[in-house]
Amino acid sequence: MLLSDVVTTSAEVSSTRSRLAKVDALAGLLRRAGDQVGTVVSFLIGTPRQGRIGAGWRTLVDLRVPPATEPGLTVAAVDETLGEVARTSGKGSAARRGALLGELFGAATEAEQTFLVRLLTGELRQGALEGVMLDAVATAAEVGKEEVRRAFMLSGRLPATAAAALTGGAPALAEFGLRVGRAIRPMLASPGESLAEALGMGACSVEFKLDGARIQVHKDGDEVHVFTRTLREITGSVPELVDLVRGLPCRTVVLDGETLALDDDGRPRPFQETMSRFGATNERELLLHPYFFDCVHLDGADLVDAPLRERNAALHRAVGDALVIPGALEPSEEEAEQVLADALDAGHEGVVVKSLESTYQAGRRGKAWRKIKPVHTLDLVVLAAEWGHGRRTGYLSNLHLGARDPDGGPPIMVGKTFKGLTDELLAWQTSEFPAYESHRTDWAVHLRPHLVVEIALDGVQVSPRYEGGVALRFARVVRYRPDKSPPEADTIDAVRALLPRSRTEGGE
């Protein structure tokens, strides 16, 4: 398959707001992709099979290679070259990578060069199409959407899921199972309106929502793997967690939980301090404490399809009470309110209310888990920053904020804020943002989608000022989220859900 086919389809998908049109265009391309379907999918979701290839933004934009006049570059040739670039290391590697990329770009048309730059710098990686792509795979392979989603959940790899669906259909998808040592996509919680509303779902648990970092832990005998919420392995950075899990009284286990750094009083340290450990080489810099809230495999038994009530019992057998996240099973409303009060008193964010009948829906943000916080917060993508005035002169300050388009388009702007930015954050933004710059004007630096920031707000209002038709009210920066990427930012639908009910229910 020619790269130009992929580029043309990518442009077609980007030019329409219709989810059905996106699915049809992608499905048509996948049917024609043959044995290159996995690579085609990896290109379209913005993540080459090789991951990072060792060439940064500046290297790519400085290539200045005249484009080819006619398309002739194949997907296979691009994939092979990227693999060679990624394998290049040692003395003279920068020059060698530059030569390989120069040759690749010389064989690409102008449109293909633009696509490759966006692919290799992460600009295409916006969740683009992840949900839409799953539907397209199902359509192209003529299999059920839930079969595709389940296989993706358990494999964590969309290209591999697509290749299996297109080559082997439903039987091939059914072969994907939970494998200890291979990360699965985490189940997510949706914002809840109130504790009382969340308790209305029936038999449930109420747990602390910790101000920590999500982890997924796999144990097979003495072999332990620790993954972040983005499925990045950090085993080598957290030896204290590895040692603790290795000593658990079970042979095999897959656990979902949070880890955080605590101060001498047992209260959570700032989130950034916890995240700093994920790249540390010396665990003594700051010890992490894990708390687990789910168990999806125990001693040979997969529990993904088991109700939470059963998984919770398995969790206690696997780790004991001390390592289970604080909370209560089937509490009364008064008891649930006490759990929330205790969580806030301990310095945490709130609680998560979970249906005890729910299965583990990995990668899904359904209604079976509801997070309750006293203050609304959203994780949004930083689109740009304006140069400051007054005492902020010389610093990048006022942030432009975007919500994720669930149909794979670019982030949708929903507001601006400079509130909550400390002097430390202003200095960090000013030094860090140019690394993600797409272009600038006299008054602002515009960024490629990369950075996610947590924003507190008092609410949302209807506004024609922004494309999404809504705007944030009294938004302020809480913290940056290095544990999240743009595909994990909150969607424009989540923002609109915060509109007053009279605005969203159409008078019903």
Image (cartoon, rainbow, N blue to C red):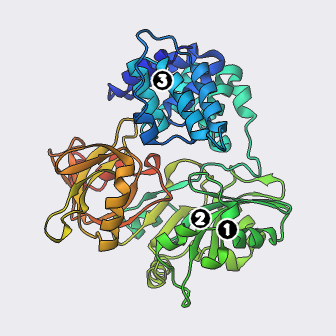
Front position in the image: 316 or 288: 288
Disc 1/disc 3 C-alpha distance (Å): 40 Å
Q: Is residue 410 left or right of residue 165?
A: left
Total marks drawn?
3
Q: Earlier in the sequence, mark 3 or mark 2?
A: 3
The residue at the point 68 percent across, 27 percent down is: 164
Amino acid type at circle 3 is: Phe
**Where 217 falls versus 493 (above or below)?**
below
Left or right relative to 437: residue 136 = right
Q: Which mark is residue 55?
A: none
- Asked which quadrant contains residue 453, the reply is bottom left
Check the image and report above or below for 284 versus 370. below
Q: Nearer the viewer, mark 3 or mark 2?
A: 3
As helix, strand or loop, the secondary structure at mark 2 comes to helix
Q: Is residue 48 visible?
A: no
Q: Picture coordinates of residue 123 (x, y %)?
A: 42, 39
The numbered dot on residue 238 is: 1
Residue 381 in the figure: left or right of residue 289: left
Real-space Cα separation, disc 1 to disc 2, in angstroms: 7 Å
Mark 1 element type: loop
Residue 278 image label: 2
Label 2 crowd (10 A; few <14 / some 14-19 / many >=20): many
Kind of residue sitting beneath label 2 = Phe
Pick whichever of labels 1 and 2 is earlier in the sequence: 1
**Residues at discs 1 and 2 in contact (Cβ within 8 Å):** yes
Q: Which residue is mark 3?
A: 105
Place of residue 13 in the rendered image (x, y in percent of width and height, measured from the top left): 39, 25
Q: Sort mark 1 into few (<14), some (14-19) or many (20+) by Cα contacts within 10 Å.
A: many
Q: CA distance from mark 3 to mark 2?
A: 35 Å
* Of callouts 1 and 3, the N-terminal one: 3
